[in-house]
Amino acid sequence: MVRDIKHWKHLYEEVVTTGLCTGCSACVIACPHDVLGYDAQSGAYKPYHFEQDGGATDCTHGDKGCTLCTRACPRFGAWEPEIDTYLHGRVREEEELSGIYQEVCLTQATDEELRNNGQDGGLVSALMIYALEEGIIDAALLSGLEGDGTTWKAVPLVAKSKAEVLAAAGSRYTYCANPYGYADAVAAGAERIALVGMGCQVSAPAAMAARRAGKIARRFSLTVGLLCSKTFDDAIFDELFDAEYGIKRETIRKMNIKGVFQIYTKDGGYHEVPLKQAHAWTREGCLMCPDFAAEHADISAGGIGAYADWTLTVIRSDLGKTILEDMENKNLIVRKSIEEDPGALKLMNKLSAVSRKRGPQGAQSFTKKIEVRPSMPS
Ligand SMILES: Cc1cc2nc3c(=O)[nH]c(=O)nc-3n(C[C@H](O)[C@H](O)[C@H](O)COP(=O)(O)OP(=O)(O)OC[C@H]3O[C@@H](n4cnc5c(N)ncnc54)[C@H](O)[C@@H]3O)c2cc1C
Ligand code: SF4
Ligand code: SF4
């Protein structure tokens, strides 16, 4: 019998060099032989193979049977039907534009500090703090800012306390490979790990679990997805915000995207940059991404809708549902029915439909018509 061994060589040909690679770093953290590196420089955000053991395009460990990188990659093979089937026992219907979920609602943290620091309702940070304090997780893989924050370079951050979660609150719109913090979390003794990140990232633990990737799959215990239609290259700070608007990165306090790029500066200033102008700095890894609504998370969170200080919350898994109910019972969050803001749900589906159009042509169309690729052998 010929074994279906798909390794770095195949990942390189099918994902890394075709535009499908989002730069999530899942292949790098899953590699048990440490032959993959990650280029986090502006304009790159890509994995690469070290020169030893096969060179850039091949892997001698892969030739001997190692398949961990392809098992971890949330853009390899027919990933959507494969993951949907693993998580929900079925593939999403074509009309389920934002993926399979149980409920959509609006949430807000009751802790004022979380509301003030959070991007929208502070739900994501409240949830991470709850999961750490309840012992559901030992660590959370988040995104923070390097150094004193003045460069606005987003970097992976491992949080094990409320203070560390708070330090990561808010959104940066440049890319940050949050899964990359995995090795540091494990080195710090974490066995149950939460991942917060965009859809391209939170699909990774689900891909690993669906393809039986072993210990790394078992360690990911909770995923919170961030709604996302694109991220921008770091060069946008100098080449657009500074060059065109005179906004220096070190003066920026907070950013948001609500139809336009909203930039709040430390001196109390407020600037708007049209999204149309910013599009030229769209990161390459986002151009073929079909997943706006972070469809493979336990809970997905976004900021669209009529209520600025609330988080649009998509409850997908039983775990997500149980956690949110317990948080509400413990008065850590308050909830509003989505019926109070039906436009938010409509807009999420509209934006999901837009992202769906840029999925890979000819590969998988992500509907139930596609046959699920059998799991790879161990
Ligand atoms: C790049 C990006 C694009 C987004 N696009 C949309 C959108 O188009 N529409 C929409 O409705 N919502 C979008 N969101 C989600 C939104 O900005 C909020 O993150 C979400 O509503 C949760 O708000 P909160 O107050 O509950 O989260 P908070 O409590 O503020 O927690 C936010 C979490 O996001 C993490 N994070 C911040 N920046 C990054 C980053 N660059 N990469 C990875 N993780 C990060 C932090 O670690 C933090 O844990 C986007 C978020 C990001 C990061
Ligand atoms: S999408 Fe992620 S896992 Fe797949 S090749 Fe790119 S960085 Fe690796
Ligand atoms: S659009 Fe968002 S979810 Fe998709 S690849 Fe880019 S960062 Fe990831």
Image (cartoon, rainbow, N blue to C red):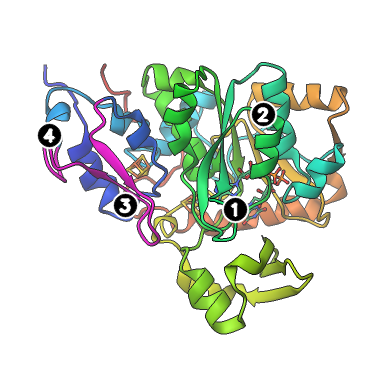
Distance from the alpha carbon under mark 4 to that under mark 2: 39 Å
Looking at the rendered structure, the secondary structure element under dot 2 is: loop
Distance from the alpha carbon under mark 3 to that under mark 1: 45 Å
Per the image, the residue denoted by label 1 is 148
Distance from the alpha carbon under mark 3 to that under mark 2: 45 Å
The amino acid type, in three-letter code, at marker 3 is Gly
Q: Nearer the viewer, mark 4 or mark 3?
A: 4
Pick the quarter of the image with the N terminus: top left
Q: Nearer the viewer, residue 69 or 367?
A: 69
Distance from the alpha carbon under mark 2 to that under mark 1: 19 Å
Residue 3 point in image, percent of width and height: 16, 21
Looking at the rendered structure, the secondary structure element under dot 3 is: loop
Structural crowding at the residue carrying mark 1, measured as other residues with C-alpha within 10 Å and reported as few (<14), some (14–19) or many (≥20): few
Per the image, the residue denoted by label 3 is 362
Which region is colored magenta?
33-58
Q: Earlier in the sequence, mark 4 or mark 2?
A: 4
* CB within 8 Å, label 4 to label 2: no
Left or right of residue 331: residue 294:
left
Structural crowding at the residue carrying mark 2, measured as other residues with C-alpha within 10 Å and reported as few (<14), some (14–19) or many (≥20): some
Left or right of residue 22: residue 178:
right
Per the image, the residue denoted by label 4 is 53
Q: Nearer the viewer, residue 104 or 198?
A: 198
Structural crowding at the residue carrying mark 4, measured as other residues with C-alpha within 10 Å and reported as few (<14), some (14–19) or many (≥20): some
In magenta segment, residue 232: no
Residue 80 point in image, percent of width and height: 44, 38
Residue name at image x 46 percent, y 17 percent: 218
